[in-house]
Amino acid sequence: MISEIPEYYFERDVEWYDWLQSNHDKFKAVLLIFYKLETAMPTMR
Amino acid sequence: MKKKAITAIFLLCLSLSFAQLLQEKNNFTRQDSLRGSITPEREWWDLTYYHLDIEVKPDEKFISGKNTVQYKVLKPHNRIQIDLQSPLQIEKVIQNGKELSFTSEMNAHFINLVDQQEVNTINSLTLHYKGHPREAKRAPWDGGLSWKKDENGKHFVATSCQGLGASVWWPNKDHMYDEPDSMLISVTNPKGLTNVSNGRLRNLEENDDNTVTSHWFVSNPINNYGVNINIGDYTHFSETYNGEKGALDMDYWVLSDNLEIAKEHFKDAPKMMKAFEHWFGSYPFYEDSFKLVEVPYLGMEHQSSVTYGNQYKKGYLGNDLSGTGWGLKFDFIIIHEAGHEWFANNITYRDAADMWIHEGFTAYSENLFLDYYYGKEASADYVIGTRANIQNDRPLIGQYNVNNEGSSDMYYKGANMLHTLRQLIEDDGLWREILRGLNKEFYHQTVSSQQVEDYISKRTNKDLTSFFNQYLRDVRIPTLEYKMKDGKLNYRYTNIIKGFDMPIQVELDGYSHWLFPNSEWQVLKTPAKTFNIDRDFYIETKEI
C-alpha cells in the first residue's frame, strides 16, 4: 500500500486560504486538485 | 472522467493537533479480536488451497459464487472460523456432500463440522455466498469493490482490501498468519471485458449466456489481501526478463486506449526488477510471472499482479514526495508497489501490528532503486528528503491480536531507520547480504517484527535491541545535545529510551570520527573548530 496523502479540491483561492488558516498545522502534506481549463469546472488558477 | 491535475503541497510545520487527532486506538472490540487474533477456531487447521469461483455482475454491483477451502488438520476440533463481511451473506456450507450449520458473530462465522477431523488429513469445505459487497470509498486505503467506468463508458472494476480484510469480498480465513500453498481464481464476467487476477491464466471459457470465465492459478503461497480481481477493457503486452532465476515473464495489462503510453512508461518495470534482484535477491514468484495491471485507483501490491493507477506519471501522481527532485526519476507506484513483492508478498507480517515490515522496507526500496541507478548520494538525498513527511505521532508497531496497524510513519520513519542502520553497519556488502538474506531466510513466510530484528542483530553481530525499541516502539527521535568550548566537545543523548546508545558518525574539521553517546554527558578533547553530524543518521541535534 502507499502512504495516504489527503486530497482537497477548492473552487476558489479564498477557500484554500481559509482551509490553511484552520489546518496548516494538522497535515504534513496534502494533494490539491486543479481541473483543467477545458473541463469548465470551477477551480483555483 | 474529468481531466484534472493534482499537486502536492507540503505543510512543513509541527503537527501537535494532528497527533492528538490520531491518538492510538485503545477501545478495541470483540470484532477486532475475532478479526485480529488466532482464535481456537483458526489455530487447529492449516490452509493448503483455495478455489475461489465467482461471477461478477458490474451492472448490478453484485457478486456470487463459492470458495472451496482446503486444509490440513493440525489437532482435533469440530468448529471452524470463516470470515465474510456484511452485507455479503453465506448461503450454505458443504463438506463431503453434507450441508453444515453455522452461527455468526458479526463478520466471523463458526461452522459446525459433522465429520471427524483426523490429525494430518486434508479436508475441504465449500462456502457459497452472494451479495452487494462494500463499495470502496477511497481505494486502496478505504477499500472494497471499485465499480468504475473508463473514459469510453466501459466497466472498470477492481478490488482492494488491505487492512479492511479480504473477507470484504470473499469468504476466507482472514488472518495474515496462514496462507494457502496455492490458489485457483475463477471469475465469470460479461463478454467484452477481461478479468486479470494473480498468477497465470490457465484457461479462458466463453459461456452461452454472454459471459466469459477466466481461470488464474497461483502456484505459490499468497496472503489474503494480495488476492485480486480486475475487470476492464484490457489489452496486453509482454516481455521476457532474464533474471537471477532465469527467464521471467513480465506481462502488462492496460486499458485499450493506453497501450502506446504504457509501452513507453512501463520501461521502469524491468529497471525495477534489475535493481531489486540486485538488492533483495531473485524475484520471489517466477512461477507465477510478474504483471502490472491498470486499475481505477492509485495502486496496490497484489502478488504477481501489481496494480497500477498512477496516470502514467513519474513520482507520486507527478509529485516528488522527497522534495529533492530525485522522486521524479521513477514512477512511484511501479517502484513502491513492486518492491512489496519482496517485503509484503515474500516476507509477510503475521500480525497487522508489524506492518512496518512491509512499508518500512518498501519505502526504503525507493531509495535503493535510486542508489542502483544514480548512486549513494542521490539515494541519501531522497530518503532524508522524505523525513519531512514524518509525524512522530505514534510508534511504528501497533497493538497485537486486534488487527491494529502502527503509525503511518512506518513508511518514511521506517525507511530512515533502515538508512541509519546501513550507516551503523558500515559495510554495504554486508548490508546487501542482509537484505538478500532476509528474503532467503523468510522465503514465502509470515513473520513477526521480532524475527526480523533478531535476524539483523545476528547477521551484524550487534545487539540492536535498544535501536529497534527506540525507532519502532517509541515516538521520540533521539536528540544529540552538544557544546564545543575550550578545546572540548561535550555531548549526550536526550529523548531516548533507557539504554539507547547508538554510535554516530561526525566530522571534526572535515575528518570523520565516531562518537559513542548515551544519556550521560561525555567529553572529547579536540582542537577542531568545526563539528558536523552525518546527515545519514536519523537524529535531532541541539547545540547547548
Image: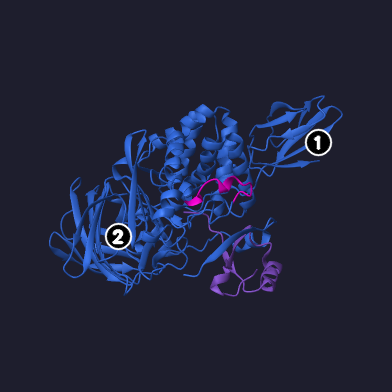
Residue at the extreme right of the image, as rendered = B486
Chain ID for purple: A
Q: Mark 1 — residue?
A: B483
Judged left or right of residue B71, residue B535 is: right
In this rendered view, identify the residue nearer to me: B245 or B315.
B315
**Regarding mark 1 in the picture, which secondary structure is present there?**
strand
- Residue B407 in view in this figure: no
User: x, y (%) of residue B482?
Assistant: 77, 37
Question: In the drawing, what numbered circle is on residue B195?
Answer: 2
- Quarter assignment of residue B97: bottom left
User: x, y (%) of residue B112?
Assistant: 22, 63
Chain ID for blue: B
B410 drawn magenta = no
The three-letter amino acid code for the residue at tag 2 is Asn
Q: Give the vertical position of B224 relative to B280 (above or below).
A: below
Q: Residue at x 46, y 37 (%)?
A: B275
**Regarding mark 2 in the picture, which secondary structure is present there?**
strand
- Residue B41 in view in this figure: yes
User: x, y (%) of residue B28?
Assistant: 48, 62
In this rendered view, identify the residue nearer to me: B382 or B459.
B382
Q: Residue at x 60, y 37 (%)?
A: B420
- Distance in Å between CA atoms under marks 2 and 1: 64 Å
Q: Which residues are magenta?
A: B321-333
Looking at the rendering, in which quadrant would you find the C terminus of chain B? top right
Front of the two marks 2 and 1: 2
Task: For label 2, count other residues whose C-alpha is less than 10 Å away and answer few (under 14), some (14-19) or many (20+).
Answer: many
The three-letter amino acid code for the residue at tag 1 is Lys
